[in-house]
Image: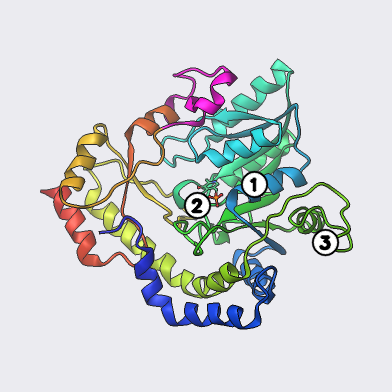
Amino acid sequence: MQFIDLAAQYQHLKDKIDARIQTVLNHGHYIMGPEVKELEQRLSEYVGVKHTITCANGTDALTLALMVLGVKEGDAVFCPTFTFFATAETIAYEGATPVFVDSDIDTFNISPFDLEKRIKETISEGRLTPRAIIAVDLFGLPADYPAIKRIAEKYNLKIIEDAAQGFGGEINGQRAGSFGDIATTSFFPAKPLGCYGDGGALFTNNDDYAALLESYRVHGKGKDKYDNVRIGMNSRLDTIQAAILLEKLVAFPQELINRNKAAEKYSKDLKGIYKIPTIPEGYLSSWAQYTLVADDREAEMAKYRQQGIPTMVYYATCMHQQTAFKNMGYKDGDFPVAEMLAKTVFSLPMHPYLPEEHQSDILEIVNA
Ligand SMILES: *Cc1c(COP(=O)(O)O)cnc(C)c1O
C-alpha cells in the first residue's frame, strides 16, 4: 500500500496527460509556452481571484510574495511554529525575522489568540517592525481567516496565505488561495494538486502585486527579459508541468470529493480511538494529510507498520526547535500546543484513489 499513490492517479489520467505532454513536445515552447498562460487562467477561475502567477515551486512563491510586500531586515513576520520549514525559511531568507506563533489545539492551524499575543509582545519590545502574517492551511484545512483578518486590520499587517497544502479547501464556499493579500501554493507531486516535478503559483486580486510578480519571476524584467529594472529571480513553471496540471485540474474536483469521502470514513470509524481531525462549520479541507493525535504514537504506528501500512509524521519538529533557528532564543515550553502536536500526531494514507478495501483493512487493524 502507498501513503500517497501517484502512480494510481497517473493510470487514471494517463491518456489525457500523455496527449498534453506530446503537444508540448510537438510545439517545443518549453519555457513560458502557451500552456502556462492557459493554466494561469484556469487557476484564477478555479480559485476565484483576478491573477495567478505560476513559478518554480512553493518555496519560491513564498519568497516572491515577501519580495512584493517589501519585507526586509528589521521586519517581523508572524507564522505558525508547527508547519513545513519553507514557511519560516523564506522569511529569514529575505533578512526579516520570523516570529513564531502557537497552534490551535483542534484545527492545528495558527492560533489567532496567540497571534495577537505575539504581535503585542513584538510591539512592546520595539526591536522589530510588525509587517505581515503568513498563515498556513495545514493538512488542507484553511486557517481561521475571519479572525486573522480582524487582527491584521487592527495592527496594519499584510496577510500571506500559504496554501501549499490547502489548494481546494474552502470557507463558506470561498476557496483557498483567495484569503490573503497574496496567496501561494505548491505543485510538489504529493500536494493536493501536484505536477510531475517542482512547481508553484501565487494568487492575488491586486493588479500592482501581479505586475511586480511577473517581473520578479523573470530576473526583474522591464519591457522584456533583457531589460532588467529590479533584482528578481529565475522562477518559472515549466511548460510541460503546466500541461500536466491542466489535465490534473480537470480531474481535481472529483478527487476532492474522493478525498473527503475517504476522510469521512476514517473519522466515522476512528472516533473514540484517536483524536480525529476537527473541521469547523462551513470549512472544507482538501485533506493534504489525514492526521490523528495519539498519546503513544510510536506504538500505534508500529501496529500499522507490521501490516505493511505506511504512516508518516508531519511534523516531529517545530520551527522554534529547528537547528537553523536555534540562535533565536526560543526554548522548549514556549509553544505548548505545537510542541504537544509535534510529539503526538501521525498521518494515515490519503489520496483520491485510495481503494475502499484498503481503507477497510486499515480500519480493521485499529479496531482489532
Ligand atoms: C510543501 C510546502 C511548501 C513548499 O513547497 P515546495 O514546492 O516544496 O517548495 C511551503 N509551505 C508548506 C506549508 C508546504 O507544505
- Mark 2: secondary structure: loop
Tell me if the residue at label 2 has its CB under 8 Å from ligand 1.
yes
Badge 2 amino acid: Gln
Instruction: Return the residue nearer the eye: 129 or 90.
Output: 90
* Residue 148 in picture, x, y percent from top left: 61, 40
> On residue 225, which mark appears?
3
Apparent side of residue 199 relative to residue 232 in the rendered image (left or right): left
Mark 3 / mark 2, whichever is N-terminal: 2
Residue type pointed to by label 3: Lys
Check disc 1 and report the residue beneath it: 62
Label 2 – label 1 distance at C-alpha: 13 Å
Q: Position of residue 197 (x, y in %)?
A: 52, 60
Extreme residue toward the left, this view: 368
Judge by depth and name the residue closer to the eye, 296 or 268.
296
How packed mark 2 is, by other alpha carbons closer than 10 Å (few <14, some 14-19, many 20 or more), is many
Q: CA distance from mark 3 to mark 2?
A: 32 Å
Q: Residue at x 20, y 54 (%)?
A: 362
**Tag 1: residue type?**
Leu
Q: Is residue 12 visible?
A: yes
Magenta-drawn segment: 317-337
Q: Quadrant of the N terminus?
A: bottom left
- Image location of residue 200, percent across then percent down: 60, 57
Q: Spatial distance from mark 1 to mark 3, Cα to Cα? A: 22 Å
Q: Secondary structure at mark 3?
A: loop
Asked if the stretch drawn in magenta spans residue 318, the answer is: yes
Q: Which mark is residue 165?
A: 2
Helix, strand or loop at disc 1? Answer: helix
Mark in the foreground, 2 or 1: 1
Residue 232 - label = none
